[in-house]
Image (cartoon, helix red, strand yellow):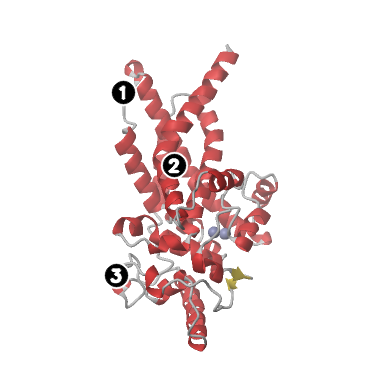
Amino acid sequence: MCRPSNTAKAALSTGGELAPPSSAAAASPHHQYYPRHFYFAKEGKGRGASRARSRLDPLNAKVESITSKWLKARIDDPSMVLPPSVLLSADGALVYPDRWRSLPVAFAVAACYLISLCPNIVMLVVGIVVMYFESDLYSGVVHVVLDDPKNLDRSNYLMEAIMFQGCLEFQWHHAIPRDIVIKGLLSSCADLNVVVFANMIVIAMVHGVPFVAGGDDRDDDDDRRRLLWSLLGLKLLYGYFGQLNHLMAHESEGRRPRAVRALQDNRVMLDQGRHNGHHRTYDDNYCLLGHMDWAVRLIDERCVPDLGGRRHHVWFAIWMVMSVFCLPCAVVPVVRAIAGCIYYYAE
Ligand SMILES: [Zn+2]
Ligand SMILES: [Zn+2]
């Protein structure tokens, strides 16, 4: 199964804190993980130098405290190799930046508008069901990529822009599992701002915008494009739903609403025990709705060659291909086919 590579194992947590550093940690050169610059830097270092006080300061303070414990331990044992996420924090990367929290609200409104473009109610209902599973699989693929410490080593601006910060936060989430609860839902949804925006731009460039002819002038292509964009709207809302699932999987028993507990018990929302499984081994249970882990395992075993230790490149390619082509080339035809069968049997 897809295992966190290199020093990630050294960073595995026990009881919510980073495990004691060990000289048995895999040997990766210290400098290997340093990107050329950080988009978000700590106070006094780079672009974050003048940043205002943030509501996420307590989380960043916890990162500081864990990082300094590791650095002190390395003074006692100079042969020790620290996890890349810790090295990057020590080098000035800000792990929990405060993102624009108004954007998820704007994106959610835009998503509702896109969903309203769906050609008809049957396709919408089918789309809601199919996208539930597609979004779950997508969350698993993204999680595999962001959990891999090798992806912290992508030393070019594009890769850093796409995933450096996400990798850093996902890998620190293993050390501080309740970070998502402390952040709150809006900040957690704001973590998706860049991915959502990039996804919409790419879909528009590759497949065209949804603002097409209406009424009698609509043809099959227009309907296909409307369906595509309505599915994209659903995917966005499911992305936010995935963040809610993840948050609730880490929330304490007494603070989870009764409705959420019922949905978790019935496996509509991510089951807490299943997600705890991910936090024990970090090599399974990646999906944030908890249904498509079998598919992630299948892809890992059957479709991802080793390529001399470069499996993370293959997983990254799978993520990119899924982002651009999964909806138009797989989900749209499936939704139309199922809707077609429903029309046929309803007549
Ligand atoms: Zn993880
Ligand atoms: Zn988690």
Q: Is residue 317 above or below residue 186?
A: above
| Image location (x, y in percent) of residue 282 | 58, 60
| Image location (x, y in percent) of residue 43 | 35, 76
Q: Which corner quadrant of the image does residue 329 belong to? A: top left
Instruction: Tell me the distance, in whole angstroms, between the alpha carbons under discs 2 and 1.
Output: 28 Å
The quadrant of the image that shows the C terminus is top right
Q: What amino acid does circle 2 point to?
A: Met
- Could you tell which of marks 2 and 1 lies nearer the N-terminus? 1
**Residue extending farthest top:** 347
- Could you tell which of marks 1 and 3 lies nearer the N-terminus? 3
Residue 213 is tagged as 1
Residue named by callout 2: 322
Q: What amino acid does circle 3 point to?
A: Arg
Q: What amino acid does circle 1 point to?
A: Ala
Category of crowding for the residue at label 2, using alpha-carbon neighbours closer than 10 angstroms: few (below 14), some (14–19), many (at least 20):
some
**Residue extending farthest front:** 308
Q: Is residue 325 left or right of residue 11?
A: left
- Return the residue nearer the eye: 64 or 89: 89
- Asked whether the residues under the numbered discs 1 and 3 touch, taking CB atoms below 8 Å apart as contact, a structural biologist would say no
**Residue extending farthest bottom:** 76
Residue drawn at (58%, 78%) of the image: 20
| Image location (x, y in percent) of residue 171 | 50, 64
Residue drawn at (40%, 34%) of the image: 229
Q: Nearer the viewer, mark 2 or mark 1?
A: 2
For mark 1, give the secondary structure: loop
Q: Nearer the viewer, mark 2 or mark 3?
A: 2
For mark 2, give the secondary structure: helix
Residue named by callout 3: 47
Instruction: Tell me the distance, in whole angstroms, between the alpha carbons under discs 1 and 3.
Output: 45 Å
- Return the residue nearer the eye: 262 or 297: 297
